[in-house]
Amino acid sequence: MADPHTIPYRGVVFDLDGTLADTPGAIVSITLQVLRGLGREADDAAVRATVGKPLDRNFAQLLDLPADHSQVLDAMAAYRSGFGEYLAEHRERMLYPGVPEGLTKLRDLGHTLAVATSKTYEAAVRTMDATGILGQFTVIAGHDSVSRGKPAPDMALYLAEELGIPAEECVVVGDATGDIEMARAAGMASIGVSYGVATAQDLMAAGALAIADSFDSVVSAVSRGGGE
């Protein structure tokens, strides 16, 4: 393992959906199915815009109801059931190409890895365990691990504290503008991935230091400090 003091970023904070796991398409499909089951219609774009945000907030918005309304709670339960079935069927195939090998390479280079996701902590652990990458990460933060979720800095700062690494020695890797905004608010660098939800232009406008178009590119960007 490399000396951690010789690498650009000692801590690497990954988003999960759309960054490590190729789940946005499934999230949209399952959400639309749940809405149709409740007699509601929503277009693909409206649902896709909710990917990477907390489930209760998403269904409250899509159903135009309070987050504690019984119909929102029913929708969340149906979604979790549907996603659980998807997870059980696809498991490690949910990961983007190169993720398992890339995570191992980053650890071998001396980076310490963490996850910041808008899933609950329990849902994140379940997804990461099923896909075989749980053991690669030292700390995981879900939106219920802190008082404020993305784009607030709370998750990033919580992870830095748990890792014992200063924020300025960490980099966030994510596919949504909320990931990049969280990093900036926490005083961390960020690398956007163009294969998830947001466009490269949106990620750069939000403050991403670099854009990666594959997970191999993520590994290269992290190891060289985001530069070309």
Image: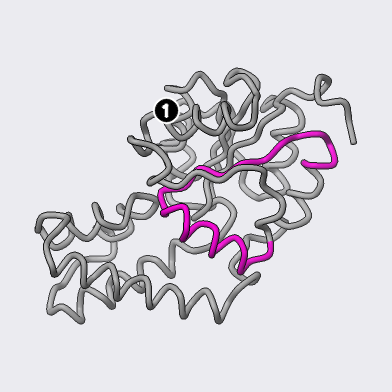
Give the side of residue 123 with respect to residue 191, left or right. left
- Residue 191: horizontal and vertical position, in percent? 58, 34
The residue under the point 33% across, 51% down is 54
Colour mapping used in the image: one colour
**52 left or right of 8 in image:** left
Residue 177 located within the stretch drawn in magenta = no
Q: Nearer the viewer, residue 109 or 42?
A: 109
Magenta-highlighted residues: 107-132
Given the image, on which type of amino acid does mark 1 rest?
A: Pro
Left or right: residue 22 versus residue 201 is right
Q: Give the camera-side residue of 1 and 101.
A: 1
Q: Give coordinates of residue 87: x percent, y percent.
A: 52, 74
Question: Any magenta on residue 109?
Answer: yes
Residue labelled with disc 1: 153
Numbered disc 1: secondary structure: loop
Within the image, what quadrant is residue 188 found in?
top right
Q: Residue at x 21, y 66 (%)?
A: 73
Location of the N terminus by quadrant is: top right
Report whether residue 228 is seen: no
Q: Residue at x 69, y 25 (%)?
A: 227
